Image: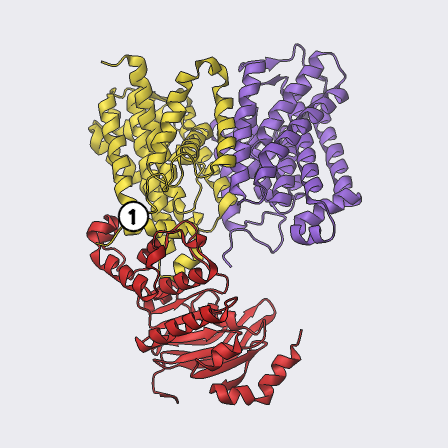
Chain colours: A red, B purple, C yellow
Amino acid sequence: MSGDTPDPLLALNGVSVTFGGIRALDSLSLAVTPGQIVGIIGPNGAGKTTTFNVITGAYRASAGDVLLNGAAITHEPSHRIARAGIARTFQNIRLFADMTVWEHLLVAQPHSEFALRRLLPTRWANPQALRRAEEVLAFFDLGGVRDRLARSLPYGLQRRVEMARAVTARPKLLLLDEPVAGMNHDEADEIRRLMLKLRDGGLSILLIEHDMAFVMNLCDTLYVLDFGVMIAKGAPDQIRRDPVVLDAYLGHAA
Amino acid sequence: MIFQQLVNGLTLGAVYTLIALSFSLVMGILGVLNLAIAELFMLGGYFGFAAVMAKLPLPVALLVGMAGAALVAIVIEKVGYQPFRDTPVVTPMLSTLGFSIILQNVATNVWGSDPLQLPDEVLSVRFTFGPVSVSAMQLTVLGATVVLVALLAFVVQRTPIGRALRAVAENRDVARLLGVSAGRVTLLAFVLSGALAGAAGVLIGLHYAAITPYIGVEIGLKAIAVMVVGGTTRIWGALIAGPLIGVAEVLTIAYGGSQIRDFVVYGFMIVILLLRPQGILGGARTQGQRV
Amino acid sequence: MMSTYYAGLLADVGILLLGALSVYVILATGQLSLGNAGFMGIGAYLTSYLTVTAGVPLTPALLIAAFAAGAIGVLIGFPALRLKGIYLAMATLGFGEMVRSFLLNLEAMGGSGGFHGMRHISNATIWAWAGGILLLVVILERSQVWLEMRAVHDDETAAGLIGLNTTIIKVGAFGFGAAIAAISGGLFAHHHVYIEPGNFSFERSIDFVLAVILGGSTIGPGALVGALLLVILPEYLRFLAEWRFAAFGALLIVMLLVRRQGLLDRGLFGLTARSRAA
């Protein structure tokens, strides 16, 4: 269901991010309602990844608020934001270099800070962690590579591992930063299928992508950024025809 | 009395400055902490000593020490740095650690672990200026340091290869695009740093009229503190930090006891690392800052 | 019945094993500490003070010293968060030297003259502690916390973004490592029954690092292999006698070139095929 609901899952209100003298983001407002797949598009350098970084707490907002289910998370440390239910993947995949796929899923488990259980061998003390990891492994069809070092996998599988790691802790919102970059049609389709499956399972998704076809077929709402400013927002069909948007892209022809 | 301490402190500080410049050259250009520099300092001292014992004149002894240390530095560059140049900087640091272990063992075996002493004190003539008495050797140390620093400054600021050095220090990738051979620059950085450390070794050896295989760890490592205080990204910070730490150390010995001096010197270093990581002379760019 | 000479070697291995483990535990979170001899010295002097001057039995003395050193390690761990890689290494080097200098100045415990009076302990005691702590580390390696430490080591930012409190993990590792080093020091003091600040110098810190890098920096038993290597190998290389340090220096360089993770690694233990279904 589109349109504004009383409490969006994620809301950015007038968020600005400045580095030195540069405005990377200028008064951005956006909202993601539960169960939506929202896309952020725009030319290179528009501030899309910056938006992700300010949501996850990697960057400080110099103005505005970030709200999760109505509660401000604007200046919270990254790990607490993650615990609150926001997970992300990265444009340049950031997997753990010396860990296997299985270990990625184990380490990303939700937990309470001081449980003694965490000091004991996982195999005996933490059956629910093992169960959850198996679940995610199966969902993403990674069973065949569970004991491979994640960074030794082909690119497409690495992306899947990164997504799998992100959803292991049952987040409410998943931020995907160019999840199908460099993929062929079949691989991208696979990711799309996974995203829809995740959405059907109750996860909301905020997506950055350059692949227009991918975005158009998937997102409920699109936000278009250019030079840190939102220049358009709406359903994919509207955006596709918006002259302001076309201008921004053509104007950046390089 | 305090002026005497100042003079003594400046002498020690001059030696620190040279070694700190040596550390700083490699650190600034390659981002690597070359722990073997402390032993190049020590070896330079032994080479210089050998020259003096062979009745060679002092300037020649200085050159012998510098050249010897520079040669060893080349070996370290080829074997200890090149294979690791694309790895995280901690790895080449550990490799230079390996070299420092080797070099110290070599020195202990070749020259023995007991101090070598000069038969007569060199340049022991003392001049008195009011409350201060300065030996000719101290003046030589200060003078030689000034000359060496000036030479280094000339090479770095005025020569083409010096420009290349600075370019690589700023941005290695851009420098390579502009045709600067990073390999040659790296080698030069090692050679210069070896020569400086070697010179410092000769000077301190002659100043104390004695040398041991342990001065690398005893004195050389403290120059790391000098480099940090001066600013690891600004090699000329060593010119200020050297005398500063030298004087601080000498004053500590005079008024606090010699046992506590390392505490003071390294304490200085840690305070700077935490409060002003860019050092006294460093600019806005800080290390250890999260993005 | 072992000759005193070999008994001495065995004791040295146990003490070095703990020192190496102290570096390993901290390194597991991506922090290289070149100053753990400082924690060892704190442990040695504090334990000795407790047993000799305060009449405390060895075990509680070791535990108290470990706890105290651990607390100092945590205190050090917080500012250490701000430093990375080589800068952290330099700071820890400085810390180790500061401790040594402090101990030189500590007239109450002998200053440069050293301290003595400790009761000699047997290899059994040393290895009870060394073996016990090694076992503890090996068990911990299979825990959730250790996996998190490895995640912090591999990519601190990504680790934060999956909800890991990297501060607690890194600082905690520092404290744990410090505590282990302190026990190493306490055992050293009671084995050699005489200690002086020179025992806890930069060279000692380097021995610990050497053992870890050579023996295996990604797995606990690597510290044991490294300790054995550093203590026992010279016995077999008698012909090298005065050149054994150079040999180890060369071995370090070769190991970094050829097998950077050290002799033992997870692959050798079949640990990349672990944790099958519950």
Task: Please say if A129 is above or below B25.
Answer: below
Q: Residue at x 48, y 16 (%)?
A: C240
| Image coords of residue C60 (percent x, y) | 21, 33
Q: Tag 1: residue type?
A: Arg
| Image coords of residue C170 (percent x, y) | 38, 49
Task: Please say if C160 is above or below C262.
Answer: below
Q: Nearer the viewer, residue A121 or B205?
A: A121
Instruction: Let me know if residue C145 appears in the view.
Output: yes
Q: Nearer the viewer, residue C254 or B97?
A: C254
SS assignment at label 1: loop
On the rendered image, what quadrant is the N terminus of chain B found in?
A: top right
Quadrant housing residue A135: bottom left
Q: Which residue is mark 1?
A: C274
**Crowd band around label 1 with a 10 angstrom C-alpha radius: few (<14), some (14–19), many (20+):** some
- In this figure, what is the number of numbered marks? 1
Quadrant housing residue B102: top right
In the rendered structure, the answer to whether residue A181 lies left or right of residue A113 reads: right
Q: Nearer the viewer, residue B210 or B247?
A: B210
Quadrant housing residue B205: top right
Instruction: Let me know if residue B129 appears in the view.
Output: no
| Image coords of residue A137 (percent x, y) | 31, 61
Q: Residue at x 62, y 50 (%)?
A: B282
Chain ID at mark 1: C
In the rendered structure, the answer to whether residue C25 lies left or right of residue A238 reads: left
**What is the residue that sits farthest to the top in this orientation?**
B119
| Image coords of residue B185 (percent x, y) | 70, 41
